[in-house]
Amino acid sequence: MTRRTLLALPLAAAAQPPIPIIDTHIHLFDTARPGGVPWPPKDNATLYKPALPPRYRELAGPLGIVGAIEVEASPLIEDTQWVLDIAAKDEMIVGTIGHLEPAAPDFRRQLDRFRRNPLFRGVRYGNLWGRDLRDEMANPAFVEGIRAIADAGLTLDTANPTPKLMETVLLLTDRVPTLRVVLDHVPQMDPVAAAQSLRELAPRPHVYVKVSSVLRRVDGRVPEELAFYRDRLDNLFGLFGEDRLVYGSDWPNSDTWAPYPAVLKVVREYFTAKGRAIAEKYFWRNSVAAYGWVKRNSTQPSA
């Protein structure tokens, strides 16, 4: 190796391409649709405006986001189809998590209907639309519906973390050990309140944590400095490690706290400091294992 080559190596290392990002948690809806939408409410001036792929791409693309997974924000079954129709027209969307009722009489039919579309990657259920996962666990039809999700190789996304929900996911994964689960928005919850459940969930290889909705409001302000959030991020990283954390923005709901660049900045600073290999896992590699999303263009990475 020549002296010139040796001198060039640090420059080559510094010239690594940016890490592509798959955002595993966005919501799509069109407030201009006839009849409106179940969410967000009309009186929410921040959120009540169309949230569609072109708007998302305009703000996320320059930040390095190359693909996104939509997570359903409506309890209406046909809105899952509406999202799939929207996604078919835009390669930025690499998957969607729909809304289905696992205990409903027509659940298997609807699951079979949607899973024929490769962009349909799972079902969201939890503390949402008046549902309570713990209550549903007593219904054998519900557990069998969850088993059907696992057998189909799809993912269960939870909703709105609480200590009770974490305990329930423990019970659910006891009943259906092959179920792949993504716990969303866990940084919004005080990890101390659910410490025991999180410790028991951590060794389960099919349980992932979505490090989303990280920012929070304290005393009327939203801190944007990593130092404020580091303890909770350290806690989750220490429990679940580098292979089971995935990135999600919660856009456009994230606008409630801060613009997208600020949402991304905190976690980008945290995970980039751990080295490129770990940052790549967080920003896209782990989401392949968690969701099996569909690569739709050359800007999106391959596992």
Image (spheres, grey):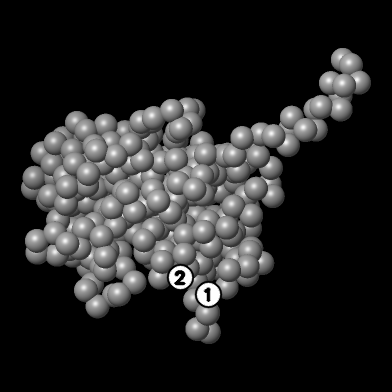
Please give left or right for residue 241 compared with residue 285 in the image. right
Residue 67, image x, y percentages = 41, 41
Please give left or right for residue 144 compared with residue 60 in the image. left
Front position in the image: 60 or 189: 60
Residue at (91% x, 21% y) in the render? 3
Is 186 situated above or below 174? Answer: below
Please give left or right for residue 63 compared with residue 3 in the image. left
Type of the residue with mark 1 = Val
Is 40 situated above or below 5? Answer: below
Separation of residues labelled 1 and 2 (CA atoms): 6 Å
* Crowding at mark 2 (Cα within 10 Å: few <14, some 14-19, many 20+): some
Residue 179, image x, y percentages = 35, 41
Q: Earlier in the sequence, mark 1 or mark 2?
A: 1
Residue at (37% x, 52% y) in the render? 56
Q: Secondary structure at mark 2?
A: loop
Residue situated furthest right in the rendering: 3
Residue 221, image x, y percentages = 52, 80
Q: Is residue 260 visible in this depiction of the protein?
A: yes
The picture quadrant where one finds residue 116 is top left
Quarter of the image where the N terminus is located: top right
Residue situated furthest top in the rendering: 1
Residue at (49% x, 48% y) in the render? 62
Residue 253, image x, y percentages = 37, 64
Marks 1 and 2 close (CB-CB < 8 Å): yes
Residue situated furthest bottom in the rendering: 219
Q: Secondary structure at mark 1?
A: loop
Type of the residue with mark 2 = Trp
Report which residue position mark 1 lands on: 222
Report which residue position mark 2 lands on: 257
